[in-house]
Image (cartoon, grey):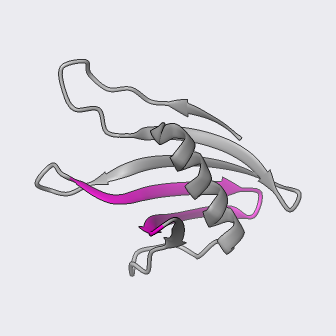
Amino acid sequence: MSFQLVTGRPDTADYLVFTTTFIHNNTFYKAALAETISWEGKATGTYDVLLQSGRGTQRLTLVEKGEHWRAGDEIEQIGCPEQAVVDLLGAVIGEVRR
């Protein structure tokens, strides 16, 4: 799974934002992930995700639970992907963090 970082201005804190593509169960996915920032400007430890495939587009939040990730349960979340897809997205977050 490859990824592309989106960088910000050089004079400010650069929160993690990236895009990635992958195939799971013969479905091609494109995803844009952004570290969630509170209104106070602090990282919350979660990631907002826009996940797109031939089946449609989903907006969700990824929440880290120990060494695993799960989809959030926000009211405005659109759909809930398979746990295997969430695990793949969590793995790429781990790669990008390094």
51 relative to 10, above or below: below
Q: Which quarter of the figure has residue 14?
A: top left
Which residue is found at the position 53% from the left and 48% from the top? 94
Which residue is found at the position 38% from the left and 40% from the top? 16
Pick the residue in front: 15 or 76: 15
Which residue is found at the position 25% from the left and 18% from the top? 10
Point out the residue furthest to the front here.
67
**Residue 51 seen anywhere in this rendered image of the structure:** no
- Number of labelled discs? 0
Find residue 58 and report its horizontal and vertical position in percent.
Answer: 57, 64
Q: Quick check: is 57 in the magenta stretch? A: yes
- Figure quadrant of the N terminus: top right
Find residue 27 and report its horizontal and vertical position in percent.
Answer: 82, 57
Q: Which residues are magenta?
A: 43-66
Q: Quick check: is 54 in the magenta stretch? A: yes
Find residue 95 and report its horizontal and vertical position in percent.
Answer: 56, 41
38 relative to 19, above or below: below
Point out the residue furthest to the right here.
26
Find residue 28 and report its horizontal and vertical position in percent.
Answer: 79, 51
**Residue 23 seen anywhere in this rendered image of the structure:** yes
Q: Is residue 13 left or right of residue 45?
A: left
Point out the residue furthest to the top here.
10
The secondary structure making up most of the magenta span is strand
Pick the residue in front: 75 or 91: 91
1 relative to 81, above or below: above
